[in-house]
Amino acid sequence: MAASTLTGIFAPGSPALLESLRTLVIAPKHRAIPGETLRAEWVFSNLGGAPATGMRVRFALPPGTQLLAQSESIDDLPLPPEQSFVATDGAPVGDLAPGASRRVRLSFAVSATIEDGSELIFQAALSSEQTGLIGSNIERLSVHSEADLKSSATMVTLSAPDQPKPGDTVTVRAAILNSGQSSAHDLMVILPVPEHTAYVARSARIGGRVLLNTDGDPFDYGSDPIAAPRLAPGQSVVLEYQATIESPLADGSRLKAIGVVSSRECGEFTIASAEIVIASPVNFEGEESALTVFCDDAVAPGMRVPMTVRAVNTGTGAAQAVSIVFDLPQGLMYTPGSAHIDGQPVSDESFSGSTFSLGAIPAGRVVDVGLAATVAVPPAGEIGLPIVAQLRWKSGERRFARALTVKVAPR
């Protein structure tokens, strides 16, 4: 009878057992914390005049706790390993003579992960062949646990090709792990598009799920940044999107992704990715950049020879400290007032030493500089007139050349 009487109690949905013997003690008696050990002790006595036989005791096992092995005892004697007070029908505790008492003990461990504010309800029950079901007092402990989003597994990364350059696509990703003991609610992640990049439409995902209708920044303050209504202990969520590096862009520009994370339980904090450096070179090597001399290869004394250098920066970075130097040979005399930049005349005073100082040339910019020279009268015979122009910038230079020939008949 005793075993079957105990079987139906403490099951989910079963009615609460009335309190009778108020001697159940749980220690320590405070707000429980994850991983803590709780010790339960229950003492009961036979106040009648006849022995109590067939006695059995059962303890409730509160959700969120585990029974510690080898912690169960009767009057300090270990309970046999094949028996347990939390078994469906409890465990036998022997007979109890009139006036005698018995003490049972066992220990519980609070789960390592358990929701904050969870209530642990402890109660024990006793039955014998002479009595019905007797319940102990009910002991309630509240659990204090915390979510933790700041582990090393919570990070923001910025993935790019090995040598990122303007026009390349990068992936911005935030991985948020709850390494705490309870759930984080209303997880918010702000993951703005990095400076010098543009969001790739419809590339945003949360946990692999594509977010629609996010043509602008998908995870900025103006959007709906709730990444997860609830993030349980040990769970993680990944947010990601793609962005295109702006072009043109200064060489050596740095990109960094920054994320802001918070939840109802965790204050706002910032995480950032490692920086990546953008290679954005200057390029004047194409055929578009050239020296043009507007005459035939053979010239005559007194002939006016116009010439220009076209500099086209086909790279993605701005060229700094650009200059073009004309090296005119003996036999070619600069024509005063002929210097010009992009069709606009340049004063001879600012055009010193046959050098045009152009400053910076942005990516994609075209600059034309030129001048005219007059062929001098050389000695009799045939001589060469090598024209050389140097295009120089802060990180490099390019040389252009054209050879003319002047013929003079003998006198």
Image: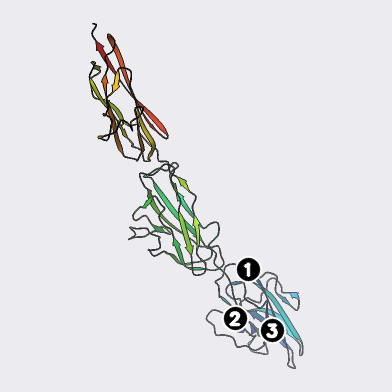
CB-based contact (under 8 Å), mark 2 and mark 1: no
Number of the front mark, 2 or 1: 1
Q: CA distance from mark 2 to mark 3?
A: 14 Å
Q: CA distance from mark 2 to mark 1?
A: 29 Å
Please state, as top left, top right, bottom left or bottom right, where the N terminus lies in the image.
Answer: bottom right
Q: Name the foreground residue: 113 vs 393.
A: 393
Percent position of residue 392, x then y: 38, 31
Instruction: Determine crowd level at label 3: few under 14, some 14-19, many 20+ residues with C-alpha closer than 10 A.
Output: many
Instruction: Determine crowd level at label 2: few under 14, some 14-19, many 20+ residues with C-alpha closer than 10 A.
Output: some
According to the picture, the residue beneath numbered tag 1 turns out to be: 35
Identify whether 348 is placed above or below 72: above
Percent position of residue 11, x then y: 56, 79
Q: Which mark is residue 7?
A: 2
CB-based contact (under 8 Å), mark 2 and mark 3: no
Q: Name the foreground residue: 332 vs 138.
A: 332
Residue at coordinates 43% horizontally, 53% vertically from top-left?
172
Identify whether 58 is placed above or below 298: below
According to the picture, the residue beneath numbered tag 3 turns out to be: 55
Residue at coordinates 27% horizontally, 26% vertically from top-left?
336
The residue under label 1 is which amino acid type? Gly
Number of the front mark, 1 or 3: 1
The residue under label 3 is which amino acid type? Met
User: Residue 16 falls in which quadrant of the image?
Assistant: bottom right
Q: Which of disc 3 and disc 1 is earlier in sequence?
A: 1
User: Residue 408 falls in which quadrant of the image?
Assistant: top left
Q: Name the foreground residue: 360 vs 245.
A: 360
Q: Is residue 117 left or right of residue 293?
A: right
Percent position of residue 147, x then y: 54, 67
Q: Which of disc 1 and disc 2 is earlier in sequence?
A: 2
Percent position of residue 312, x then y: 31, 35
Q: CA distance from mark 1 to mark 3?
A: 33 Å
